[in-house]
Amino acid sequence: MVEQERSPEKMISLAVEKNLRREEVQAGLRPFQLVKYFSFTSLGVILVFTLILSWVISNHARKIMLEQSEDYSLLLAENLNQQVFRSFVLPTVVRFGKIALSHPDQFEMLDRIVKNATQGLKTKSVTIYDSSINIISYSTRPELVGKKDAGGVEYQKALKNSPISQIVFSGSLLSLIPGAPSVQCQLKTYIPFRQVSSSGAASPQIMGVIEITQDLSKEYGAIIELQGRIILVSSIIMAVLFLVLRTIVSRGDRFMEIRATERLRLEEKLNQSERLAHLGTMVATVSHEIKSPLGIIRSTAELLEKRIKKVAPGNEQLAQIIVDETTRLNNIVMEFLDFARPQEPKLSRVDVNTVVRKALQFVEPNAREKNIELRAELEPDLPPIDLDQEMFYRALLNILVNGLQAMDDQGVLQVSTTGEAAGSATSKDGQMIREPESTGVVKIIVRDNGKGMSAEKAEQIFKPFFTDKNRGTGLGLAISRSIIEHHHGTIGVESKEGEGTTFTIVLPGV
């Protein structure tokens, strides 16, 4: 039977239907892709806000540290002001009549008082500026003494009775890298140096400016390290969350893809089943209409053959050709009918070896003509199983005939049977399955050493109307598979080009 060519309208319709199915599958994946997009986007937003939050926290900690240090520095400066005025200014005026720090005794006395007042405190240097001219009158750093115009804007503001602090720092998160310059931080506080009354109250009269420099490098470095730890921990947590989310999303993506592919496969299988159902109805109708005329033609040819023998002896082979061809056409019609209207098996207890011997006996003449050796390795004492003997005989015969046709004039066709215990693994369409534990299985293996076939062809041979032979319908193996599946069995094929083919039939035991 030759399949009719598809019209352009039919081809366009099939293409549109396929595109619609693909769009439906893609539409089913879009919500998950949207969830995946928002998941990764939200993770990125959380990471950015976490980094910003860590930066804000570290900056706030640095601000608090500087404010506390500034308050401490102002308190220290006020205390130093009290100590210097009471312990140095007053005694010096009484003793020397005036203050002259160029005098070694006065300078040494002031230096001793300042160092005693700042001993054990986080003070890097103390500098005192004169109020009349911008000159350093005293400093714990001797090289600065006598330096003119050293006071800047801060000095001018302090002279106007406005205490002020200035922070000078260098370094950032990059300072945490080994080999990078270390963190430096200094806090300079400028307060007016006033006279102090006996009650401890400061006088409005300003005698100079006191500059206290504190080294806060260690504290500032701790803030930088805290900031780095926060960012590092946040990054690690975000990386772990990203990996977890990516793993979940990847698994979900694969699951959705498998589901979508399975759905598409089931839809294609359903559409194929519908097409085969319609095709089967058509084939059954056409075959039924052909069967009756074929019977008439065959009967007429047999009558002609008898008359030709009497009228024109030697020409009766012409009528025999008609009989043979009508017999072949009748077999084809019967194959179509078997495919279009599969029968339910009528099960009974049957010895599988008996069916195998019967099939081998039928194909033996054909095998002898092609010099093909038939080998039977049948396991003795194989328990009977539930089979429809006639249906299974036809299925096995189709497989044997296929094996004979795959070989040239020489070869070996081997059939073996074996029984296996419950729960053994079997093969179905190249995939391994496991039989229920409640039953054993019976295997029938048909092996030939013919030309074999490619893996692509092996996947197609059980499909209806697939054939690479010049003659034949391509229904033999499809019918065999249908019969075996109606017996709740499986059939698989393994083949290599140039080496041969092996069919394995697995039937449930008792």
Image: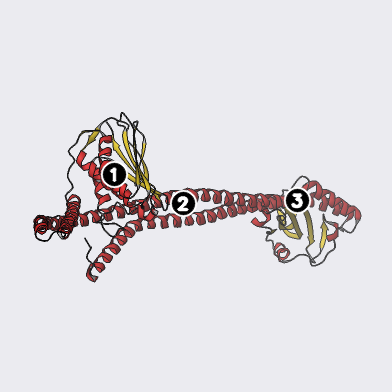
Relative placement, left or right, of 390 versus 253 is left
Secondary structure, mark 2, is helix
Structural distance between the alpha carbons of marks 2 and 3 = 53 Å
Residue 362 coordinates in the image, percent (x, y): 25, 43
Would you name the residue on which mark 1 appears? 364
Discs 2/3, front = 2
Residues tagged 2 and 3 counted as in contact (Cβ below 8 A): no
| Tag 2 residue | 246
Residue 475 position, x and y percent, is 24, 53
Q: Amino acid at mark 1?
A: Glu
From this viewpoint, which residue is outermost toward the top?
381
Contact, mark 3 vs mark 1 (Cβ under 8 Å) = no
- The image quadrant where one finds the N terminus is bottom left
Is 347 located above or below residue 167 in the figure?
above
Q: Quadrant of residue 157?
A: bottom right
* C-alpha separation, residue under disc 3 versus residue under disc 1: 114 Å
What residue did someone put label 3 on?
Answer: 123
Residue visible at 75% across and 57% down?
Answer: 211
Q: Nearer the viewer, mark 3 or mark 1?
A: 1
Kindly identify the amino acid type of the residue bearing the numbered disc 3: Thr
- The outermost residue toward the bottom is 8
Frontmost residue, 213 versus 44: 44
